[in-house]
Image (tube, grey):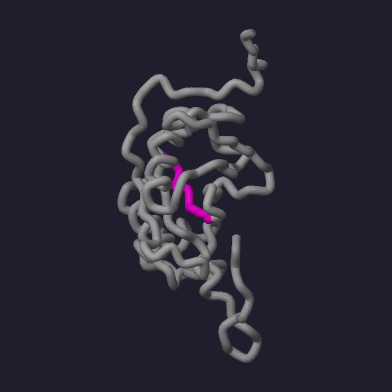
Amino acid sequence: MTQTIPASRAPTHSPTPPSTPRLRMEPTGSRRTLLDGGWWPRSTDPVAELPGLVLAIDRLRGPVTRLVLAADGWDSRPRRLGVAGRVLRLGYFTSQPVSLLTALCDNGDRVDLLVVAPDTASNIADAAMVLAAIASNRIGPRHILRTVTTASTGEVDDSAPEAVWEDEGGRSGRRVVG
């Protein structure tokens, strides 16, 4: 007996082999980091971009089973993606920042990556990915590009999280996740 899978539940497969992702990840896999690294996709096509990223995360942290993505910023929104003989579930959420991708692995690991827009200048994209991959980084994904752009131009950005000061002149103790 042949079972028919509804089109809405059938996985999407990339017609081309997975590309090598432009990815930098925090090497220790520490759970105490704000971000685990940064990823700079070449396009906004999830079917073309995600398989290579998934395979790279598989090698570093364990098999990915689900991806949480921003609802905005992608050309399409497939719900299931076939990668390396398995099917991953993809969730798109309006509450997820465009600059953040979360991968959930079957070993319980969670990988949070800065997503750098494809049209970002290479020097800015590389600096942002390096900063996102540093274990001591405390700058959230929404502010990293502004921070590295400001650093490269030498201008002071008073709205960046590291520039937030308390009334008495000490650093703010709040944890910035944005």
Give the answer, above or below, for where 27 lies relative to 77. Answer: below
Image point 64% across, 12% down: which residue? 4
Q: What residue is shown at x 44% (from left), y 24% (from top)? A: 14
- Quadrant of the frame with the N terminus: top right
Image side of residue 107 versus residue 27, left or right: right
Res 68 quadrant in image: top right
Q: Quadrant of residue 110?
A: bottom right
Extreme residue in the front direction: 1
138 in relation to 88, above or below: below
Task: Please indicate whether residue 3 sits to the left or right of residue 83 in the image.
Answer: right
Residue 92 at what x, y percent from top left? Answer: 63, 38
Camera sees residue 177: yes
150 or 52: nearer the viewer = 52
- How many marks are shown on the rendered structure? 0
Q: In the orientation shown, which residue stands out farthest toward the bottom?
A: 168
What residue sits 61% from the left and 81% below the top?
173
Residue 117 among magenta residues: yes
Where is residue 75? Give x, y as percent. Answer: 53, 28
Question: Compared with residue 166, is residue 107 higher up or lower down, i.e. above or below?
Answer: above
Q: Is residue 99 visible?
A: no
Magenta-highlighted residues: 109-119
Residue 143: percent from left, percent from top: 52, 60
Q: Which residue is drawn at 45% across and 29% down?
A: 85
Quarter of the picture holding the C terminus? bottom right
Could you tell me residue 159's position as x and y percent?
Answer: 56, 67
